[in-house]
Image (spheres, rainbow, N blue to C red):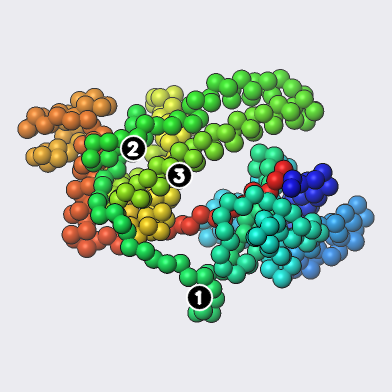
Amino acid sequence: MKLDGEQQRNLRRYAGLCRFVYNKALALQQANHAAAGKFISYVTMAAWLPVWKREQGSAWLKDAPSQALQHALKDLEKAYKNFFAKRADFPRFKRKGNGDSFRYPDPKQIKLDQSNSRIFLPKLGWIRYHNSRDVLGELRNVTVSSKGGKWFVSIQTLRQAQGIAQREVAIVPSTATTAIGVDLGIARFATFSDGTYIEPRNSFKTKAAKLAKYQRRMAHKQKFSNNWKKAKAKVQKIHIQIANARRDFLHKATTTLSQNHALVFIEDLQVGNMSKSAAGTAENPGKNVAQKSDLNKAILDQGWGEFRRQLDYKLAWKGGMLFAVPPHYTSQECPECHHVAADNRQTQAQFVCVQCHYENNADHVGAINVLERGYRLLACGDAALSRSVKQEPTEVSQLSS
């Protein structure tokens, strides 16, 4: 059963009310800071929330679930803490249509009927959804979010509480017995030490011309007019298609690797540093800015960081392990005589050792060296230091729209 019109309007309204509370609290924090006041805590802000509901012109705040509004204030406090800890930038005001979401933090108010693929949420009632996976463990909270005109419900469950396992995740030994080295690149997305490789998906590049076309149309419309909103929706749709294509490509690649190999060695690439702008400043302008910009786009289009994240948790699920090795000179070192020289890589794709005349594809040479360095890393006992941090994906089910 699809969402009816009233349910869709309520979802948009509740997300908008939570955004209003977040922005109002952020404005108060900024004004308080400008007046040399101390940081206003969540407890103080939450005490003001009933007052805001009684104020003239904002009585419509009563329409939204109270705990969802309170959690918007918690999100702001968390954003400030991340800023103070230098984990994130300064909190910014939220815009309509950009990541609209709200959360139900109290599991007592939520009912989940998995057999019928429906969930009960306060002030929304029973809503049917398309189930993406079974919900395991004790339900803790639910987040409702909008993306590309569709609504999603993300269900968080508790795995362990007070030393008592709520949901046991079986650690199975890997059925695979092989190890492989992976070299990431632009011309080839991933080249493996066994000589095979994966062609790049280039999700953004394939849609760039169409995206630019609709962006030009949007720029010619009167801002915030109905036609402008329609043009903006088409631009957003293309962005979502790009993201979905990239995510699908990465999931297929990482699933295949995790199923076929017990050990995967990958370069410890600092993608953020590699894709920094070379524009420089007015006093000290950069060099080859256009070429570096194209390279940055190509690097980010490949999704190297997401590839590594997915590969890490999927290998852990399958009983395998992911190891990151130093990336220095992997494509300039000869795998035969181990001579390192920039002249070994005569072109982007060709490797010819100037000492022993070993020839091969440069990306394949890099993958071979990554595998060898991984073995040396294991032999030296430093594997635990190079293991990337596990991140499990959020459990998401899609609401009908």
Q: Secondary structure at mark 1?
A: strand
Q: Give me the disc on residue 251.
A: 3
Q: Position of residue 48 (x, y in %)?
A: 80, 65
Whether residue 331 is situated above or below residue 177 in the rendered picture: above
Looking at marks 3 and 2 on the same chain, the residue that comes earlier in the sequence is marked by 2
Q: Is the residue 88 above or below the residue 108 in the image?
A: above
* Left or right, residue 113 beside residue 133: right
Q: Which residue is mark 2?
A: 190
Q: Amino acid at mark 1?
A: Ala
Q: Residue at x 18, y 30 (%)?
A: 360
Identify the residue shown where x is 69% and y is 31%: 233
Which percent across, then down, holds residue 257?
A: 35, 46
Q: Nearer the viewer, residue 6 or 126?
A: 126
| Side of 227 where 355 appears, left or right | left
Tag of residue 84 = none
Front position in the image: 42 or 216: 216
What amino acid type should be assigned to the residue bearing mark 2? Ala
> Marks 3 and 1: in contact by CB < 8 Å?
no
**Labelled pair 3, 2 in contact (Cβ < 8 Å):** no
Q: Earlier in the sequence, mark 1 or mark 3?
A: 1
At 78% from the left edge and 31% from the top edge, which residue is drawn?
224
Q: Which mark is residue 165?
A: 1
